[in-house]
Image (spheres, coloured by chain):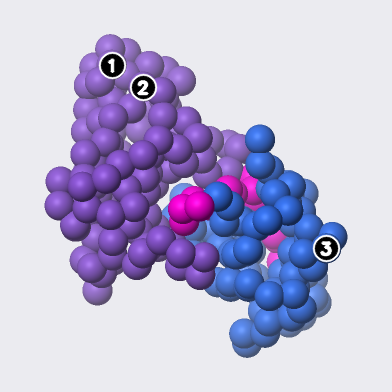
Amino acid sequence: NAGVTQTPKFQVLKTGQSMTLQCAQDMNHNSMYWYRQDPGMGLRLIYYSASEGTTDKGEVPNGYNVSRLNKREFSLRLESAAPSQTSVYFCASSEREGDNQPQHFGDGTRLSIL
Amino acid sequence: QKEVEQNSGPLSVPEGAIASLNCTYSDRVSQSFFWYRQYSGKSPELIMSIYSNGDKEDGRFTAQLNKASQYVSLLIRDSQPSDSATYLCAVKTGGYNKLIFGAGTRLAVHP
């Protein structure tokens, strides 16, 4: 029962390098989300995909791009990494949009940018 | 800017006591409220959801919602050391299933 799987779990990058974080869910959920979590700031939404084929910006989208590859997979790309993007990144999914739909989280990717 | 506020803690309670965690939110039209538990270095785990005014109980957990006061709380009865974690309050706002998270309250249950 995998749920939401994120790869990699840890990564160290140098400033200016690019990287793609991968996320896949096996719950047949329609909606998927990318968050970042920084100390003392809680989780902040970067991008989300309400359904396959759609993506929208969240609260902090600058410096990121996303791709909803298919219903299962939602990737997050850093084109030119900056030290301010050092964070823990969580992918989440929910069955569909709607008031009562809880989100289920992956284990996170811990990303350090030097 | 829609906000969700929580006391960062730590909230320290003895084993067996009731832990009371509080959350206030700014968006008056919010309809759905969630409590997540996050152990250090782990991902958030959903423990309670509440949508209507009043209390909702699930085992040792009770969520309380007061929309007029824009206030949601989580009570943990018979607190155990294994309950020591950060508790995140999340509020759904806007037309999509977008959650706004509070920064979390760290709970420490001591034997």
Chain of the residue on which disc 1 is drawn: A
Query: Magenta stretch: residue B96 in it?
Result: yes
- In this view, the mark in front (2 or 1): 2
Q: Relative to A21, does residue B68 appear above or below in the rendering?
A: below
Residue A51 position within the rendered picture, expressed as x and y whole percent measured from the top left: 28, 54
* C-alpha distance separating marks 2 and 1: 7 Å
Residue B30 position within the rendered picture, expressed as x and y whole percent measured from the top left: 65, 57
Q: Which residues are magenta?
A: B95-111
Identify the residue at image location x=66%, y=35%: B1
Chain of the residue on which disc 2 is drawn: A
Q: Relative to B6, does residue A10 appear above or below in the rendering?
A: above
- Asked whether disc 2 touches disc 1, contact meaning CB atoms under 8 Å apart, the reply is yes
- In this view, the mark in front (3 or 2): 3
Q: Are marks 3 and 2 on the same chain?
A: no
User: How many marks on residues?
Assistant: 3
Q: Which mark is residue A80?
A: 1
- Asked whether disc 3 touches disc 1, contact meaning CB atoms under 8 Å apart, the reply is no
Colour that chain A carries in the picture: purple
* Amino acid type, callout 1: Ser
Q: Secondary structure at mark 2?
A: loop
- Residue under numbered circle 3: B68
* C-alpha distance separating marks 3 and 1: 45 Å
* Amino acid type, callout 2: Gly
Q: Which mark is residue A63?
A: 2
* C-alpha distance separating marks 3 and 2: 38 Å
Identify the residue at image location x=25%, y=20%: A79
* Amino acid type, callout 3: Ala
